[in-house]
């Protein structure tokens, strides 16, 4: 089994040759992280909180923030809008059972008012908080739309950072988080290979995952990541075939996480009717690439689109990781 392997890497190309082994290179592209339950930029932490939250953070109108009823509703709406702009999916409404909510209070300090924010879990526990910059008491108590909107926008960015820090702390203590357990991968369809390639590649890929401390999931609802394989074969002038194998990694909500690409020049007889050792070597290297994509996904911050696209979950259930 001979030929030239072309390795595709981010930032450039490398050409490698091996005569004895089927070595394949990886394309690790567009790697992101898992959608967070309500935080868009959690840093390198995993996907789940220790107490399963809904996918949004609730901002109830404050009753003890030195604001009238109308102003309280305005401020909650302004703060929710400002937090969404900071990639924190949330909504202003009264809190219900099993909601994660942001409590807003205020205290008077001389001629200024200090707004206080506290993150409260469904169990009533306060997980942390943030004190906003003091404001002139007269401006705060007046409750004009312009003053409330300016206050909400000023508090949103540092509050979002504080919420991300709290989220990270909670996730680290969660035994079910991807930080503290092996990832679960469900292999979907492997298509396009000649001979028995589709079956052989899938079989060897599943065999390779446990050796990398990755659990093979047999049902989508138990998987953290979904992988599909796509094979394209292009005949070459010299009688060999250029074989491209793409392994696409998505999260369980089908959001794209990354891709592992492999290129190799093979003889048609290497793939038909049986792939044999070629499939075993290809699947092993593909599994190593998928492992790296998963690691990158856990280390990279989520995109605003991924955070906002998290589907609703039933109260009391963990959101999709």
Image (tube, rainbow, N blue to C red):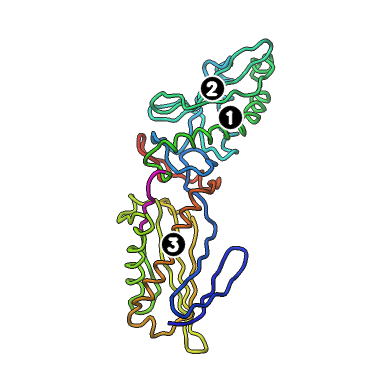
Q: Is 182 part of what is drawn in magenta?
A: yes
Classify 9 as above or below 273. Answer: above
Q: Nearer the viewer, residue 105 or 283?
A: 283
Q: Which residue is mark 3?
A: 288
- From the viewer's perspective, tell me whether residue 219 is left or right of residue 320: left
Single out the mark in the foreground, 1 or 2.
2
Q: Between residues 4 and 245, which one lies in front from this camera angle? A: 4
Image x and y of residue 164, in percent: 53, 36
Element carrying mark 1: helix
Query: Quarter of the image containing the N terminus?
Result: bottom left
Alpha carbon distance from label 1 to label 2: 10 Å
Start-end of magenta stretch: 180-186
Decide: few, some or many residues near mark 3? Use Cα within 10 Å; few <14, some 14-19, many ≥20: some
Most extreme residue toward the front is 20
Q: Residue at x 38, y 46 (%)?
A: 181
Q: Nearer the viewer, mark 2 or mark 3?
A: 3
**Mark 2: which secondary structure?**
strand
Q: Residues within 10 Å of mark 2 (few under 14, many from 20)?
A: many
Q: CA distance from mark 2 to mark 3?
A: 47 Å
Please tell me which of labels 3 and 1 falls first in the chain. 1
Residue 176 lies in the magenta stretch:
no
Residue drawn at (61%, 32%) of the image: 158
* Residue 161: image location, x then y, percent: 58, 35
Q: Nearer the viewer, mark 3 or mark 1?
A: 3
Q: Which residue is mark 1?
A: 79
Give the number of the disc on residue 104.
Answer: 2
For the image, the number of numbered tags is 3
Q: Are marks 1 and 2 in contact (CB under 8 Å)?
A: yes
């Amino acid at each position: 089994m001979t030929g030239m392997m072309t390795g595709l890497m981010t930032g450039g190309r490398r050409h490698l040759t091996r005569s004895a082994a089927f070595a394949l290179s990886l394309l690790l592209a567009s790697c992101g992280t898992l959608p967070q339950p309500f935080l868009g930029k959690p840093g390198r932490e995993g996907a789940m909180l220790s107490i399963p939250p809904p996918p949004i953070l609730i901002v109830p109108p404050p009753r003890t923030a030195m604001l009238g009823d109308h102003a309280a509703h305005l401020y909650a709406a302004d703060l929710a809008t400002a937090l969404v702009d900071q990639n924190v999916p949330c909504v202003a409404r009264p809190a219900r059972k099993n909601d994660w909510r942001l409590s807003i209070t205020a205290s008077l300090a001389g001629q200024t008012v200090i707004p206080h924010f506290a993150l409260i879990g469904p169990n009533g526990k306060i997980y942390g908080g943030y004190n906003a910059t003091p404001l002139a008491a007269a401006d705060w108590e007046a409750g004009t739309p312009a003053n409330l909107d300016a206050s909400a926008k000023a508090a949103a960015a540092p509050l979002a950072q504080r919420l991300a820090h709290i989220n990270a702390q909670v996730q680290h203590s969660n035994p079910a988080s991807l930080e503290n357990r092996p990832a679960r991968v469900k292999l979907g369809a492997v298509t396009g290979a000649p001979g028995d390639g589709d079956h052989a590649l899938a079989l060897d890929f599943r065999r390779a995952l446990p050796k990398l401390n990755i659990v093979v999931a047999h049902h989508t609802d138990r998987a953290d990541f979904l992988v599909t394989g796509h094979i394209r074969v292009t005949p070459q002038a010299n009688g060999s075939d250029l074989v491209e194998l793409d392994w696409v990694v998505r999260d369980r909500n089908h959001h794209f996480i990354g891709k592992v690409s492999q290129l190799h020049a093979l003889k048609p007889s290497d793939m038909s009717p049986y792939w044999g050792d070629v499939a075993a070597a290809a699947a092993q290297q593909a599994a190593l690439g998928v492992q790296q994509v998963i690691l990158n996904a856990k280390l990279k911050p989520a995109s605003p689109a991924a955070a906002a696209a998290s589907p609703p979950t039933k109260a009391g259930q963990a959101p999709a990781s």
